[in-house]
């Protein structure tokens, strides 16, 4: 048998070296083996609308080698479970012709066929001959009827054939590709820099999404702009064209008035719109806000190996098809990659982050599963490097350490460092010792998943490596923890052993970020519609510039805040020091904040911790989307820390179902060490006020 290599189009465009290309081609196993005969596999359609109902016939024409009893063809479909189940193809089944996912088969010769379904998630359907034979030119037709996946990307049909029951399965040469097209435009998103100066030119980006969060490439509507700044230089009315493919960048836009300003858009198609505020300064500011996602997964974590393509000797399972394992045994093997059949890729994810959700920084963080080996890690790092554009889009190098429920994102600034996986480093002390020996910059970011009472995630303190933690991700969302969103699930309660209030109480000086934990190659996706279920939070870093050095400095110094996925603007300082700081105060702390919401603000609160207790020392319900305030903590008489919490009104008020849709944001704390002179300062100030009152009377 001769072997040829078929290069996926999505990788042809990448600007990476030949060594990396070889690694990438090797990882796409279902592209690589070619059987040199006249067999052929065709699909009855080469495109379908995302989420639509389709009946697809796969016609397999037999080649030079005939097919006899037990021989046939099998397919692997992207199906899923839990919160993303209905976003993929209907699960194949053979029992109910009138239900979704029904699979049937027939041959051109009338030979009797056996059709079965199986697989870890039930995504494999197989058709084999029960008797007779199929010779060169005979046809085997397998018909699938069900819903198409919601992800608008090419579906490369995974198929394997064998000639008889004793043969091994072989991948089909040049499998069909079904292009999944987006639905019509549903949501129009505007993004622009969060921090600008008066008169500074910037790019305003308009992105149109369908109801599933796909880029609505077919949108051709008209849009018109308006702004809170009546002196702004705005784009002229615009009509989307085919060349836009759902994205248009408007250049040379300027704000010419200070403080919070935003641009809104009207469309002839009556789409939902989403925009955000920028803060316009009269002079250069030290830090700017950059939005990112440091936690998402793709099938590249397992080299995009299909479940039925995993070799039989993986992890000691000799001569065993991984798809014949029980779910329990499969979870022990844990070869899931993106948990959804390894169909997604980091290439797609980074494109989505950079071009669609318009993030400033992003890092794929694949699970440390058995198949995430050195080759997969090399590919992951090379992809991150390929997408790094200093000043525009920053990537880091990351993976997820996953022992039990103590998951942590391991974030590296430098390329070429080690993956310390859970099998060799099963607890935090051993992991941190490995970091010590490696001697390179690293952030160990806890990712809380379940709120068990016996949680041990905060049992060990390390304020060197655990500088940041995820306070919000997919695990707070209603789609994973029915029936409702729980934005504060991992925030509240000093006695809740999974919460950040508990961690801070125990002495962890940890800043906070949000992330998505997205498994669909859609980092940064938010709940723009009820169909974009796999959404999470965002990390915001206050950095001097958008590059690895400056963003890393911001993350390491906890100059960060978290949002539930929307671009809420927060500025929070104490005595002029930014969030994440540790300071010593000789005076009453002066707390200053600026907030620009993406909706009306329901509650703006300053939370204080002192002497083992949390309290709210500022609580305001602005009848506005923006607010600014300055307060003094007159009750400052011992070491304390403070953080800002922002809650917006419900995004979709009055809907029939009851779950909340309030977006939120949290600042990293600021720790303030008390000095005796501070107390004296308070007494002097109070005495001065009393004397002034006596004088007035």
Image: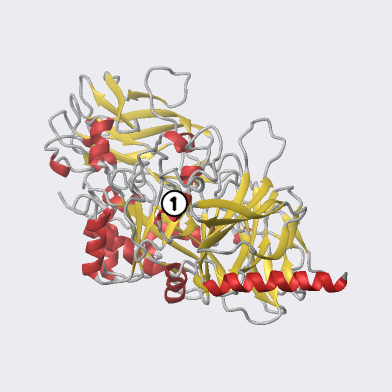
Q: Residue at x 42, y 55 (%)?
A: 295
- The residue at 44%/49% (across/down) is 502
Tell me the residue at 22%/63% (across/down). Answer: 434
Can residue 9 be seen in the rendering of this structure?
no
Q: Is residue 550 left or right of residue 664?
A: left
Q: Front-most of 469 and 4? A: 469
Residue 591 in which image quadrant: bottom right
Q: How is the image coloured?
A: secondary structure
Position of residue 673 measured from the top left corner of the image (x, y, whole percent): 49, 68
Depth check: 453 or 476 in front? 453
Q: Which residue is the site of mark 1?
A: 521
The structure residue drawn at horizontal position 50% and vertical position 75%, both measured from the top left corner, is 391
Q: Position of residue 89 (x, y in %)?
A: 44, 35
Relative height, residue 591 to residue 677 (above, below)? above
Q: Quadrant location of the C terminus?
A: bottom right
Farthest residue toward the bottom? 283
For the residue pair 12 and 95, the one nearer the viewer reads as 95
Q: Is residue 598 left or right of residue 582?
A: right
Residue 401 position, x and y percent, is: 30, 53
User: Which picture quadrant has residue 420?
Assistant: bottom left
> Residue placed farthest to the right in the image?
697
On the question of residue 308 being in view, the answer is yes
Q: What SS does tag 1 mark?
A: loop
State the image quarter where residue 121 is shown: top left
Q: How many marks?
A: 1
Q: Residues within 10 Å of mark 1 (few under 14, many from 20)?
A: many
- Judge whether 512 appears above or below 253 on screen: above
């Amino acid at each position: 048998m001769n072997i040829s290599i078929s290069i996926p189009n999505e990788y042809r465009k990448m600007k990476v070296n030949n060594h990396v290309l070889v690694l990438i081609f090797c990882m796409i196993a279902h592209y690589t083996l070619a059987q040199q005969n006249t067999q052929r596999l065709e699909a009855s359609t080469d495109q379908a609308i995302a989420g639509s109902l389709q009946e697809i016939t796969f016609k397999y024409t037999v080649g030079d080698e005939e097919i006899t009893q037990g021989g046939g063809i099998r397919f692997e479909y992207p199906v899923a479970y839990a919160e993303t189940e209905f976003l993929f193809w209907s699960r194949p089944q053979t029992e109910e012709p009138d239900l979704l996912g029904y699979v049937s088969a027939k041959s051109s010769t009338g030979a009797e066929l056996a059709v079965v379904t199986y697989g870890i998630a039930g995504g494999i359907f197989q058709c084999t001959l029960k008797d007779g034979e199929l010779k060169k030119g005979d046809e085997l037709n397998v018909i699938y009827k069900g819903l198409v996946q919601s992800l608008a990307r090419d579906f490369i049909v995974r198929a394997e054939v064998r000639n008889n029951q004793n043969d091994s399965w072989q991948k089909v040469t040049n499998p069909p590709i079904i292009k999944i097209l987006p639905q019509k435009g549903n949501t129009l998103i505007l993004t622009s820099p969060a921090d600008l100066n008066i008169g500074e030119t910037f790019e305003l980006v308009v992105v149109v999404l369908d109801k599933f969060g796909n880029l609505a490439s077919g949108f051709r509507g008209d849009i018109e702009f308006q702004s809170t700044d009546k002196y702004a230089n705005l784009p002229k009315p615009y009509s989307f064209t085919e060349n836009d493919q759902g994205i248009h960048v408007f250049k040379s836009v300027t704000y010419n008035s200070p403080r919070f300003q935003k641009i809104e858009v009207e469309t002839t198609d009556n789409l939902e719109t989403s925009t955000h505020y920028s803060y316009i300064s009269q002079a250069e500011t030290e830090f700017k806000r950059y939005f990112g996602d440091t936690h998402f997964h793709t099938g590249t974590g397992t080299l995009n190996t299909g479940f039925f393509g995993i070799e039989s000797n993986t992890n000691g399972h000799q001569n065993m098809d991984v798809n014949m394992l029980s779910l329990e045994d499969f979870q022990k093997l844990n070869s899931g990659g993106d948990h959804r059949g390894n169909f997604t890729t980091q290439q797609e994810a980074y494109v989505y982050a950079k071009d669609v959700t318009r993030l400033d920084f992003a890092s794929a963080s694949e699970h440390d599963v058995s198949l995430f080996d050195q080759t997969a890690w090399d590919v992951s790092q090379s992809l991150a490097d390929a997408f790094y554009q200093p000043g525009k889009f920053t990537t880091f190098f990351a993976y997820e350490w996953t022992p039990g429920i103590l998951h942590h994102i391991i974030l590296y600034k430098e390329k070429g460092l080690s993956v310390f996986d859970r099998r060799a480093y099963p607890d935090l002390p051993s992991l941190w010792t490995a970091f010590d020996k490696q001697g390179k910059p690293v952030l160990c970011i806890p990712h809380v998943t379940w709120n068990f009472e016996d949680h041990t995630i905060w049992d060990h303190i390390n304020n060197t490596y655990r500088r940041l933690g995820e306070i919000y991700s997919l695990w707070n969302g209603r789609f994973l923890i029915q029936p409702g969103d729980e934005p504060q699930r991992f925030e509240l309660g000093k006695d809740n052993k999974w919460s950040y209030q508990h961690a801070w109480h125990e002495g962890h000086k940890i800043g906070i970020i949000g992330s998505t934990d997205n498994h669909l190659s859609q980092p940064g996706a938010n709940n723009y519609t009820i169909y974009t279920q796999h959404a999470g939070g965002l990390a915001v870093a206050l950095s001097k510039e958008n590059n690895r050095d400056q963003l890393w400095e911001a993350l390491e110094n906890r100059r960060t805040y978290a949002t539930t996925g929307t671009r809420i603007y927060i500025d929070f300082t104490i005595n002029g020091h930014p969030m994440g700081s540790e300071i010593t105060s000789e005076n009453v702390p002066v707390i200053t904040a600026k907030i620009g919401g993406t909706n009306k603000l329901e509650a703006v609160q300053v939370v204080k911790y002192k002497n083992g207790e949390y309290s709210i020392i500022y609580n305001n319900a602005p009848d506005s989307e923006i607010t600014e305030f300055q307060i003094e903590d007159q009750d400052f008489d011992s070491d304390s820390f403070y953080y800002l919490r922002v809650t917006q009104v419900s995004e979709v008020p009055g809907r029939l179902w009851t779950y909340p849709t309030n977006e939120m944001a949290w600042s990293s704390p600021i720790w303030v060490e008390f000095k005796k002179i501070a107390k004296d300062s308070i007494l002097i100030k109070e005495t001065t006020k009393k004397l002034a009152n006596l004088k007035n009377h």
